[in-house]
């Protein structure tokens, strides 16, 4: 394997995650599932704005923005987006202006991320309920407008750049496991837009075929998702200038069985998973991404598909503010 510390040389990056996030053994949860080997990679434990996976991607996106001398960052997402909140927060930290374009209506319903965006005083523009394609066009128009105003904007739109954050995280995870003598055999993570998972897979693939990565869909169906994932995996290879010794199909398994009715809509099992994590470990997981992923992991462990003697790590990718928005789903009767 290539010298790990060298793989990012020449690629712009800034520091936003100031130290390793914990790889935490969870004894009570392990006991509940009659095992002694469940670990959680605590990506919610970062110091900026309640943390989350997007901060690792922002190290590379904002690194590129700085390297190009940009003075304002444009990003887009739905009103409740974790990505938008963390982009705003990271820009505050390093002193760049930030504009968020929301493909949502402005409304007064409480939302955890919206509340934090308001506290940070970030500029937000509501575009209404438009498609992702239309949103892309409006982002580029907005960039052109800023350029004509004499600004130097950076538009966050290259997922392969963001994916590098999780190549780095994969290496961090494997080094933590090795130094604690954990023979990690299974990794679970939410499958959504793709950059996090593509980077993680690329990084874990550097260590060969021994590890199995369970991708639990919280948004897309297999065919579309896998084509996005493969494309990103190849683009990461182009950026870094090499490919890992094994490919996606050697280490990844994709599941769409835990998605339920769709993105952001809880399932009875996902609400149970939130309670199981809170009751066993006092670890709070949100409902859009992590709850479905944990529900999937619990089901696969119960059914014996993940052998009980093999060590498991589940990512907790953050999104904590959204749990407060989801409280209504937990009212009696649900
Ligand atoms: C965005 C997000 C994900 C999914 O990451 P992608 O790279 O978009 O697939 C998972 N968990 C949380 C909390 C997120 O905000």
Image: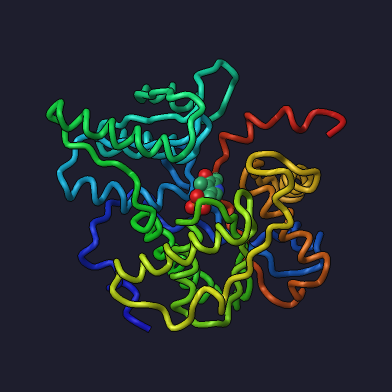
List the single residue furthest toward the top: 108
Task: Tell me if residue 203 comes above or below residue 118 in the rendering.
Answer: below
List the single residue furthest toward the right: 333
Task: Tell me if residue 288 comes above or below residue 194 in the rendering.
Answer: above
Identify the residue at image location x=23%, y=57%: 12
Task: Tell me if residue 216 comes above or below residue 132 in the rendering.
Answer: below
**Location of residue 87 by image quarter:** top left
Task: Tell me if residue 7 comes above or below residue 208 in the rendering.
Answer: above
Residue 314: % across, % down = 62, 60
Horizontal side of 132 relative to 298 (left or right) equals left
**276, 211: nearer the viewer:** 211
Is the image coloured rainbow, by chain, by secondary structure, or in one colour? rainbow
Horizontal side of 35 relative to 5 (left or right) equals right
**261, 75: nearer the viewer:** 261
Horizontal side of 129 relative to 167 (left or right) equals right
Q: Is residue 43 visible?
A: no
Identify the residue at image location x=61%, y=49%: 219
Quadrant occupied by the N terminus: bottom left
List the single residue furthest toward the left: 150
**228, 87: nearer the viewer:** 228
Identify the residue at image location x=50%, y=19%: 106
Residue 303: % across, % down = 83, 67
Horizontal side of 52 relative to 295 (left or right) equals left
**Location of residue 102 by image quarter:** top left
Identify the residue at image location x=39%, y=52%: 57
Q: Is residue 301 visible?
A: yes
Residue 142: % across, % down = 28, 30
């Amino acid at each position: 394997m290539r010298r790990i510390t060298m793989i990012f040389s020449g690629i712009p990056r800034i520091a936003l995650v100031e130290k390793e996030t914990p790889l935490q053994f969870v004894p009570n949860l392990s006991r509940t599932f009659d095992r002694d080997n469940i670990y959680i990679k605590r990506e919610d434990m970062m110091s900026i704005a309640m943390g989350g996976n997007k901060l690792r991607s922002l190290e590379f996106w904002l690194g590129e923005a700085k390297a190009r001398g940009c003075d304002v960052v444009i990003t887009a997402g739905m009103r409740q987006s974790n990505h938008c909140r963390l982009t705003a927060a990271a820009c505050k930290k390093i002193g760049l202006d930030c504009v968020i374009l929301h493909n949502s209506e402005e409304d007064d319903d409480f939302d955890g991320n919206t509340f934090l965006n308001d506290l940070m005083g970030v500029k937000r523009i509501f575009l209404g309920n438009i498609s992702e394609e239309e949103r892309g066009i409006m982002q580029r128009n907005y960039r052109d407008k800023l350029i004509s105003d004499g600004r130097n904007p950076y538009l966050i739109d290259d997922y392969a750049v963001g994916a590098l954050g999780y190549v780095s995280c994969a290496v961090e995870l494997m080094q933590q496991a090795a130094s604690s003598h954990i023979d990690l055999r299974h990794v679970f993570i939410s499958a959504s837009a793709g950059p996090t998972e593509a980077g993680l897979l690329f990084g874990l693939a550097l260590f060969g075929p021994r590890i199995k990565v369970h991708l639990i869909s919280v948004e897309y169906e297999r065919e579309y998702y896998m084509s996005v994932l493969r494309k990103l995996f190849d683009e990461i290879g182009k950026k870094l200038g090499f490919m890992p010794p094994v490919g996606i199909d050697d280490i990844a398994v994709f599941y769409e069985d835990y998605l339920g009715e769709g993105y952001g809509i809880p399932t009875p099992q996902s609400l149970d998973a939130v309670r199981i994590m809170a009751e066993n470990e006092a670890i709070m997981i949100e409902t859009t991404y992590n709850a479905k992923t944990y529900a999937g992991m619990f089901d696969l462990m119960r059914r014996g598909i993940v052998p009980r003697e093999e060590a498991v790590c589940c990512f907790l990718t953050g999104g904590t503010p959204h749990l407060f928005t989801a409280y209504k789903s937990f009212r009696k009767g649900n």
